[in-house]
Amino acid sequence: MVAAQRYIADINGLISTKSPHFRIVVRVMSIWKMYKKADQKEIKSLELIFIDAQGGKIQATIPKSFMDSFIKYFAEGCLWQIACFDHALNIVGGYRCSKHEYKIVFEPNTIVDTVDDVVDLDIPNHVFEFTPFSEISNFIANFDFCFDVIGHVIGVSEAIIDGDKKRISVELEDERADRLKITLWNRNADAISAMMADHPVMSVVLIVQYVKCEKWNSRASVTTNMYNGRIFLNDMSMPAISEYKMRLEDIEDKDASVQQISILSNIFGYNTYEDFVKDASMLTLSEIKELEEPCYVVTFAKITGLVKEFDWCYLGCRDCNKKVTEIGKDTDTRLVGLPKSNQRGKGKKVTSEINGEGIKKFLCSKHGLVSAVTQKFKIHAIVVDGSGSGIVTLWDRQVYNLINKNASELLEEEPGVYYPNKLEELKGKKCLFKLDISQFNIRNRDSEMSVARVTTDAAIIKQYLQAVAEDLEIDAETSIEFGLSMTQTDDSTAKTAVSCIGDVNIQNADIGTPLEDTADSPPPKKSKSTQDLESVKSHQNKCVRKI
């Protein structure tokens, strides 16, 4: 009996795939070794992604017990006929790289044969299923599967090396101007580093295959799969990249992305815990109010509300955070603070200029006359920890990193709205703040504190809490528990924080939903962990923990 030509789509659970007459012709698109979760050095299986002439894609598993019998056959790009295999539901494990309902499971007697006698060999090397950035950021996509994404690079962080692991964060923008941050590991991180070294301002289209997504702190945390994640950089031989570049060229202001990659190459600002806490003290919010000298402070707190009586954005210079002033007729540079180096003669008046393209001129106190301006965030937020509360000022890039939207986008998406609903996403976020405590803050104990840096990175926060644990001589697990409990204060504490800011009354500030009151519950029996927590709280107003 001659074997009939079958396709991946025919693996549907209705017929047996163990027969030698059920044969599929496939190309190996990806191959990697899966390791046991408990022991990252012990191989669990060999995993493959097969594609066929219809564009079908399916994951295959070869158990370790007989993996050596098959591994010699497989390399990326090779064509094979496969027969006598089993199939199972594609529901197990955290690295599902195919959305097919089933996966192929090899058996000891599975046949792997050449394809010399097969006519239909029109099988692509790659089949991508691109997921829009907006579906990932808004949690519409199914995070049970790995995704493929495509976009142009607008930001690259410095490399972080931890033992034999290396990671780099990149920010991509797609055709819809949506943005996505992705963490790349090891060989993929090396490829990005090499690209930035050779072409730091080059326009780069990037495909990232098999990204994993998780929900962390109300945001999508996106990273390449440690085992098989791969990237494709500016490979014009790939239709997906060449077609994307052609579409991108049709978009107005296409050169902006080329310029931005160098400007934003360090947008993430911090790379490690050590960098974040450098030259700063670890203090609680109540301890900050006892400071006698200006300094940098690192503190862990929860955003519980927003002070909505202040504007949430302003018109600023594109290249810095300075507020700009539009040039009017006979504007005197001496009155608006134009730097002397930029003045056109002492005391000379600058007349409003509109060139042939209709570009207005603005005055920036740092860059002088500018035409490139944009809306920038300035958010006044209420923060609370286990010792008290306070008000902090979050700036443009910090807010963008927390909500994944810029101020101009919010103005377009919610026109005429006094305070955009999107900003409500800030409430409830547990963040590590690096605060710039000024002389004004020292003189005015309840004044707003300017945020120098902010992160929701789980690894950095964990290291901070472990450092607190070491300083107070408690175990790290208790410190992490304390880190969570210190944000669970009641609503009255937040109200106190916004009773006044200087001489400005903030009676109508939105302080968020009160937490459940458990005062009527009987006191639980104290465990060692509970006793350690009490030890932390008894020390928090006595210790100034220097890094």
Image (cartoon, rainbow, N blue to C red):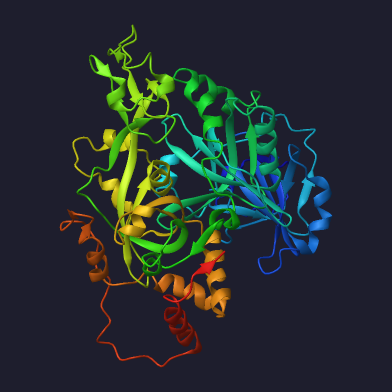
Judged from this view, the residue extending furthest toward the front is: 346
Is 545 left or right of 392, judged from the image as shown?
right
Q: Is residue 326 left or right of residue 43?
A: left
Q: Nearer the viewer, residue 120 or 403?
A: 403
Residue at 75 percent across and 40 percent down: it is 80
Residue 126 image point, x, y percent: 64, 35
Asked where in the image residue 30 lies, by quadrant, the reply is top right
Query: For the point 56% across and 69% down, which residue is it?
Result: 467
Seen at 44% across and 30% down, the residue is 319
Choose top left, top right, bottom left or bottom right for residue 520.
Answer: bottom left
Residue 225 seen in render: yes
Task: Check the image and name the residue furthest to the top.
Answer: 356
On screen, 400 above or below 121? below
Q: Is residue 13 above or below residue 259?
A: below
Residue ID at (78%, 64%): 65
Q: Taking 114 as reference, is 100 above or below it?
A: below
Q: Nearer the viewer, residue 369 or 103?
A: 369
Q: Quadrant of the N terminus?
A: top right
| Quadrant for the C terminus in the image | bottom right
